[in-house]
Each structure stands twice: as C-alpha cells, then as structure tokens.
Image: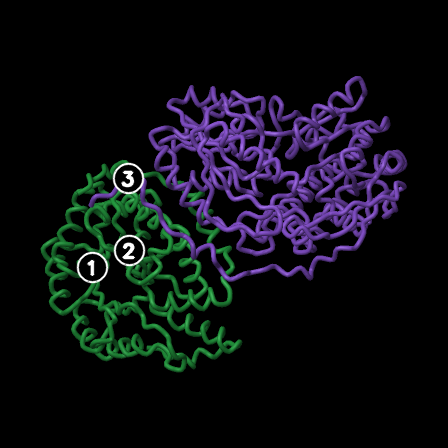
C-alpha cells in the first residue's frame, strides 16, 4: 500500500451538521432596563445614563444597563460601610453562613435561567454555562459558607478579622462565576462588598442581585454597580475602600496598583496569562489532544489560564498535529444556544477585532495558520478555531495574550529546553504537563513558574483549590483556604 | 507490508481522560431528522445475535425471519446487517436467510473462553466457513495475553485469518477480562496487525461487556492504524447495548472519532439481541408522537 504518511484526513462534515437542538429562551426573564443595586434596592443612576447590552451571537439588544458615575459609586461604598459597621461585622459567623448557603441554593434552583442568560449575554455555549459556569458558581458559595464559622481553625491563634469594605471588579469571560469567586469568600470572612461586573456582561450579576434580595441578605452587604472603566476607576480610587480584588487584564492591573500605591488598600490581582501546555512523547496522546482542545477552545479561548502556547516534543510532533487537526474539524461552531455547540460567539466586536489583529500578525510573522473548515454564522461575532505552526518564542503570537481561540505551537527536544521556554514569558498563571511518567511530572511542576499546573488534564477548577498567578499574572490567591486569607487581617 | 510495532510498548491511555471524553459524546443532543436517520442506521448495523446452549433450528429460523421483517408496519425500514450464531447453526441460518443479503456471522475458536488448541480452533473456523458463514467472530487467548505471550496471540489470529479465506474476521478481545485500557489498546494493535478485519469488544458472556470508553480506545487504535497504513478496520461493540439512546451515543462517537467513512455497516456493527426492538419503538414514537406497548413489537 503506497500511502504517504500524514496525508490521510478523515471526513467529518456530517458530524457538524446535526439537527438544531436549541435551548428555550423562555425561562430567561430579562427586564428592559436594569438599575444599580445599592443598599438592598435597585436605584436609578444619578448619571441618568444607560448603555446597551447585546447578544454577541446575534448583535441584538438584550437590555439597558445603568451607568454608575462617581456619585453612585460613593453611594454604594457608603451603603457597604454602614452595613459593615452597623451589622455585618458583628453578625455571628453561623448567621453569615446561613445567608451564603441560601444564595448557593437559590443559584441551584434558578440554574437554568442563569445559564440561559449567561449564554445570551456573553456568547458562551449553553453546554458550558449549564454544565460548568452555574454549577461551579453555586459550589463556590457552598464551599465558603462552610468556612464562615471555622475561621479560627483556618488561622489558629491569629485572631482573624475582616478588612471592611471590598471593591471587586470582574471580567466578562465567566461573569457569574467570577462574581461568586469574589463575593463568597468576602461574605464568609465578614466583609461587605461593592462589585462591578464587566460592561458587556452585567446581566447575571444583576440576576445575582435579585437572588441576594431573595436570600434576605441585610441591605448594603452586597452592592452591585454597573458601568465601564470609569466606574471601576471611581471604585478603585474611593478613599473608604479597604481592599481591591480585581480580575482582568495585566494593563488594567498595573493601573490599579499605581492608583492604590501609598494607600492602605489591600489588593489581589488575577491578571493575564500565556500558559504553556507541554506534551512529551510518552504522553497518552489521544487524551493530550483532548487536553489541547479543552485548554485553548474552552469558552472561545476567553480564559486567562488558557493553554495558548503548545509545546510538543519533536518526536511526536507530526502525529499530534495530525490528530489535532482532525479533532478540530469535529468542533461545532455556531449559535451558543444550541446544545451541540462547542465554540460559541466571541464576547464583543472589540474582542473579535483584537483576535483578528493577532491572526494577521501571526501570518505576517511567517507562522503557518490552520483553521477548521466549519462554516460560521453571518451575523454575530465568530472566530474559527485556529492554530499556528512554525512559531518561535520571538513571535508576538507566542508572547502576547490573545484571549481567543488561537493556539501557537512550538516544538522542543529536552525537558530543560521546554522548562526554559515555558518560563520565558512575563506571565505565570498556569501550565499543563502531559506525560505517563510520574517523576517527570514532579520535576516539571517544581520548575515551572506558574500558579496552577495541571498534569494530564487541563482547565480543571474546584472551589477548594487556590488559583492565582506568578509575575505579571498577578498576586494573591482565590479559592480554597488561601482565598480566605485575602479577605482577613491575620 | 508495514513493519509490525513492538507490542510491549503500545501507546498509553489515560483512564480519566478517556472516560471524560467518552462522556462528552453523550452530551450531544440528537433530534428530528438526525435522530431518525441515526436510528435507521443503527438498525442497519445490528448483528442480531443468539448464542445460547439451548439454541435450536426453530429458534434460529425465527430470528432469521425477524431479521428480514423487523417491523413491517413501518415501510422502508432497513434490515439488520447480520445474524450471529454458533457454527452448528450456520447452515440453518444461511438457508433461512436465502438471498436477503443479510450476512451470517459465526462465532468460532472455542467461543467464548478460547481455551483449546490451535488445531481445534482452526477446524472450528473451517467448519463454520464450510457451512456458509460470511463472517467469523473469533476470541483471542486472554490467558496467553496476560502471560505476555503476544506473539502467540498474534500468530493465532493470523492462523485463523488464513483459515477464514474470503470471510471477514472479527477478533473479540473480551475487554472485560483485560482489566485496563492500556491492555485494550495493546490487544487492539495486536489484532489489527495480525490481520483482523474487525475488532470487537466482547463475547457478551462476561460483564462488563462493551462500554463507551473501551470502544473509544479501540476506535482510536483503528484511527492510528489507518493513519499509519491507510487500511480501514471495522469496529463492533457487543453486549450491553440494548437502548436506542445509547446506540445513538455510540454513533456520535464513531462519527466524531473516525468520521463519515465508517458510518455504515461495512465498518461498524452492534452486537446485540434486544437493541432492535427499542430502536423500532423509538422510530414509531418519532412517527406517531406516542410510545407504543412493547407487545406491538415481535420478540423473536
């Protein structure tokens, strides 16, 4: 049989052409307009201004969202301060836990509604918001509810005390989940909160405000204000904030650190990443390919810990690439509300432009681009899953965070070489190692400079496990026992 | 001929990863015309099976009639792919099926344990062939496999393949006795390089029989073999697949691992006895909107 190696390609057209299986929108009640959640009530913004939030999959308007200005921010911080001084800091830990459990349970009860809204507002596939975002958000509340009355055991003989008012700013990639990451530990430790969701994805945070009302949390303990960068800046600069918790880009993280320099404000910053996903020749290759897919195409690649730099040992490079390309052809790109969709819409037009810019840069730099052959909807913001081969460390697509479904692939020869390359980045949030050899895993994990390292898996999250970065990926940890410390004087 | 690899170092399988991947296929939502087409395809891929000590001419004839007339109320249904019986029943089945186009598959090689001599296994195979079997379902020597005697297992498969002549050979790995996914992968590789036309999970006599992760490991072995040699190998999960929904999950998996080239009964079979009626019930449900009593579907 005269068959040229690596020329065989499997055919997958039919696997992408399944009959539509759309999730119903009827469970999602979205109001025409949303106000600011301050002191337990929805209040009109003093700016009197509203901005549109759209569905990135169809570019249709979903709702109008209040734009908070400095006066609104002040109102929210004052409400949080009052709630803290007059009640929340004296509330017994058991009582605090009760409220947090309540929130967790209501999230579970309203899971379907939250999943649908998350998908409509953010563009992520309904399968992910249903199976990952919403259940994990509920789990965070459950987990931290359990800690509320056990802080003395978490920090023995240290007499842990809350910080006061926490200003929290969250990104658009996991809107509800990030709100849970921020609010749950803050409440468990006795702090009050002013939270600002990202401007493109405010809806589930506002639904969470409804849930918080329903849970009967005392007014002012959690305040949710909406708006863009200026609102966030007003929050960061407010003099009566004790702590800033920020998840977002490294550029904004640097601005925040400058702004709070010389103040008494504490901070945790969870910033960008450019994670190395490393495949050795003794790895379980088919599962590793799955890990590559999950690492870079989960949530359209809008993941700070996405495995966006792939390193493959040269002896298995050809076969891994062949398997990866065939696997990419089976990915279903399209309407996020379809239960079969694997890759949904890019979160915003602006972000799609950023991604497209990098696709151009990659090609100009001489890297070879491959995209799957799938069709994408005409309306809405979409990007085909993309890989670049023939990439070097000196290429911008290997250095800068793209935050989209774009993977750069490099090869390596030895363990030392790949450790050096993996660490040769200003970021240090996460990494993945694929090998059948346990000793190699331990060697790699002790030498890679990254906050989270996965072995033979990728993008696994659990409330019990701390998450956070090295270097320009930020500082401080969220999740687990470590996540409590970030909200306590100990 | 391609070089035969060293089977002592076959590719590694990560248990957690393969099980996670297999469960992902079950998340696909198969609806409307995709569902109807899938159900009909699954029906057409069935090896309708009876492998019992109490099998009689009468029982086999009834099963053959069922194979040819699955549910005449529903016009335009396909038939099953094959009937699967013991060698002694091949003649009866062959005659009963006539020129229907349905194949007769026979288990052989001291099925199901395979604990006999090579000479007897070859004669068993040749007898089934002489009775008119179109396909032979052999079992591998699991004992020898566990002893690490991979050459013995390889040579035995090659010898049976030779005895098969033009009949297609299905090699049953009996994955429920192999213990790990690594061993399933190794046995798959041995079978394919030794000349198997199909690799098959189970005899149906051991629990667990076919599972989705095991089938996934075997499909990936087939894919690697195809990448390397350009030669297609067929797959047959057998045992434990009795519901239409599960059969659709298997087809989704097949479609997304090996693609369209394998989506017919030349390259994929279900070894099952009760699956057909559940598929028929689902097809009627799709047509009428209502579930009918099981008694509307014949039990042969």
Do residues under tags 3 and 2 come within 8 Å of each other at their CB atoms?
Answer: no
Q: CA distance from mark 3 to mark 2?
A: 21 Å
Q: In the displayed structure, does residue B88 sit left or right of residue A13?
A: left
Q: At numbered mark 1, what does the secondary structure look like: helix, strand or loop?
A: strand
Mark 3, residue position: A5
Q: Is residue B169 left or right of residue B252?
A: left
Mark 2 chain: B
Q: Is residue B235 above or below residue B154?
A: below
Q: Which residue is mark 1?
A: B168
Q: Nearer the viewer, residue A103 or B40?
A: B40
Identify the chain of the residue marked 1, using the numbered disc in the image.
B
Q: Quick one: label 2, few (<14), some, or many (20+) residues within 10 Å?
A: many
Numbered label attached to residue A358: none
Q: Earlier in the sequence, mark 1 or mark 2?
A: 1
Query: Which residue is painted at 78% across and 55% down in the image?
Result: A31
- CB atoms at circles 1 and 2 under 8 Å apart? yes
**Residue farthest front in this picture:** A364
Chain A: drawing colour: purple
Q: Is residue A353 left or right of residue B42?
A: right
Quick check: marks 1 and 3 in contact, CB under 8 Å?
A: no
Which residue is rendered at x = 68% and y = 30% of the image?
Answer: A154
Which of the two discs, 1 and 3, sits closer to the camera? 3
Q: Which chain is green?
A: B
Residue, disc 2: B234
Callouts 1 and 3 in the same chain: no
Q: Does residue B248 lie above or below A144 as drawn?
A: below
Q: CA distance from mark 1 to mark 3?
A: 27 Å
The chain to which mark 3 is attached is A
| Residue A261, horizontal then vertical, whole percent | 77, 19
- Front tag of 3 and 2: 3
């Amino acid at each position: 049989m005269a068959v040229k190696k690596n020329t065989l390609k499997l055919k997958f057209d039919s696997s992408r052409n399944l009959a539509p299986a759309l999730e119903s929108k009827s469970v999602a009640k979205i109001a025409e307009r949303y106000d600011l959640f301050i002191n337990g009530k929805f209040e009109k913004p003093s700016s009197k201004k509203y901005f549109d939030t759209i569905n990135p999959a169809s570019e249709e308007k979903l709702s109008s969202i209040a734009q908070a200005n400095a006066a609104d921010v002040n109102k929210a911080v004052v409400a949080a301060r009052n709630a803290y001084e007059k009640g929340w800091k004296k509330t017994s830990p058991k009582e605090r836990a009760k409220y947090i459990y309540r929130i967790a349970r209501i999230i579970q009860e309203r899971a379907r509604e939250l999943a649908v809204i998350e998908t409509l507002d953010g563009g992520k596939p309904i399968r992910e918001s249903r199976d990952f975002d919403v259940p994990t958000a509920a789990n965070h509340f459950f987990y931290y509810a359990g800690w509320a009355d056990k802080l003395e055991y978490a920090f023995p003989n240290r007499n842990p005390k809350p910080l006061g008012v926490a200003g929290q700013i969250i990104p658009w990639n996991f809107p509800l989940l990030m709100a849970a990451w921020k609010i749950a530990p803050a409440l468990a430790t006795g702090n009050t909160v002013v939270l600002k969701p990202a401007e493109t994805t405010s809806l589930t945070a506002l639904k969470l405000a409804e849930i918080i009302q329903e849970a009967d949390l005392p007014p002012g303990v959690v305040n949710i204000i909406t708006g863009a960068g200026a609102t966030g800046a007003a929050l960061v600069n407010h003099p009566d904030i004790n702590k800033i918790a920020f998840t977002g880009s490294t550029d904004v993280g640097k601005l925040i650190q400058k702004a709070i320099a010389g103040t008494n404000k504490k901070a945790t910053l969870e910033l960008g990443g450019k994670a190395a996903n490393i495949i050795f020749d003794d790895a379980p290759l088919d599962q590793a390919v799955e890990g590559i897919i999950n690492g870079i195409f989960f949530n359209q690649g809008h993941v700070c810990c996405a495995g966006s730099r792939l390193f493959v040992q040269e002896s298995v490079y050809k076969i891994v690439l062949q398997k990866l390309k065939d696997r990419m052809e089976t990915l279903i790109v399209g309407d996020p509300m379809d239960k079969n969709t694997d890759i949904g819409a890019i979160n915003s037009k602006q972000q799609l432009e950023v991604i497209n810019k990098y696709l151009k840069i990659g090609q100009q730099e001489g890297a070879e681009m491959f995209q799957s052959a799938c069709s994408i909807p005409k309306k809405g913001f979409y990007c085909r899953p993309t890989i670049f081969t023939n990439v070097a460390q000196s290429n911008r697509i290997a250095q800068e965070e793209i935050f989209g479904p774009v993977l750069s692939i490099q090869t390596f020869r030895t363990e030392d070489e790949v450790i050096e390359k993996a660490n040769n980045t200003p970021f240090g949030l996460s990494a993945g190692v694929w090998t059948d050899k346990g000793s190699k895993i331990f060697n790699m994990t002790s030498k890679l400079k990254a906050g989270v390292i996965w072995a033979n898996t990728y993008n696994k999250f659990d409330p019990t496990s701390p998450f956070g970065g090295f270097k320009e990926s930020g500082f401080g940890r969220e999740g687990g026992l470590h996540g409590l410390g970030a909200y306590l004087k100990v | 001929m391609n070089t035969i690899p060293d089977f002592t170092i076959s590719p590694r399988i990560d248990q957690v990863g393969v099980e996670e991947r297999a469960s992902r296929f079950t998340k696909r939502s198969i609806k409307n015309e995709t569902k109807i087409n899938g159900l009909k395809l699954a029906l057409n891929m069935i090896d309708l099976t009876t492998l019992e000590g109490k099998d009689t001419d009468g029982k086999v004839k009834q099963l053959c009639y069922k194979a040819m007339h699955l549910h005449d109320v529903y016009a335009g249904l396909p038939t099953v792919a094959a009937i699967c019986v013991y060698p002694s029943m091949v003649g009866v089945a062959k005659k009963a099926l006539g020129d229907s186009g349905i194949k007769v598959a026979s288990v052989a090689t001291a099925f199901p344990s395979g604990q006999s001599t090579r000479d007897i296994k070859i004669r068993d195979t040749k007898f089934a062939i002489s009775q008119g079997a179109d396909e032979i379902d052999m079992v591998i020597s699991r004992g020898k496999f566990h002893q690490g005697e991979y050459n013995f297992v390889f040579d035995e498969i090659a010898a049976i393949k030779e005895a098969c002549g033009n009949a297609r050979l299905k090699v049953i790995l009996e994955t429920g006795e192999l213990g790990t996914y690594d061993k399933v992968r190794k046995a798959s590789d041995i079978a394919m390089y030794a000349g198997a036309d199909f690799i098959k999970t189970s005899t149906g006599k051991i629990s667990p029989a076919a599972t989705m992760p095991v089938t996934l490991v075997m499909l990936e072995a087939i894919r690697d073999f195809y990448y390397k040699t350009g030669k297609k190998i067929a797959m047959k999960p057998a045992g434990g697949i009795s519901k239409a929904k599960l059969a659709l999950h298997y087809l989704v998996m097949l479609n997304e691992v090996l693609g369209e080239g394998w989506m017919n009964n030349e390259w994929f079979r279900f070894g099952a006895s009760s699956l057909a009626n559940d598929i028929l019930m689902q097809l009627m449900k799709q047509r009428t909107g209502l579930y009918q009593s099981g008694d509307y579907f014949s039990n042969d």
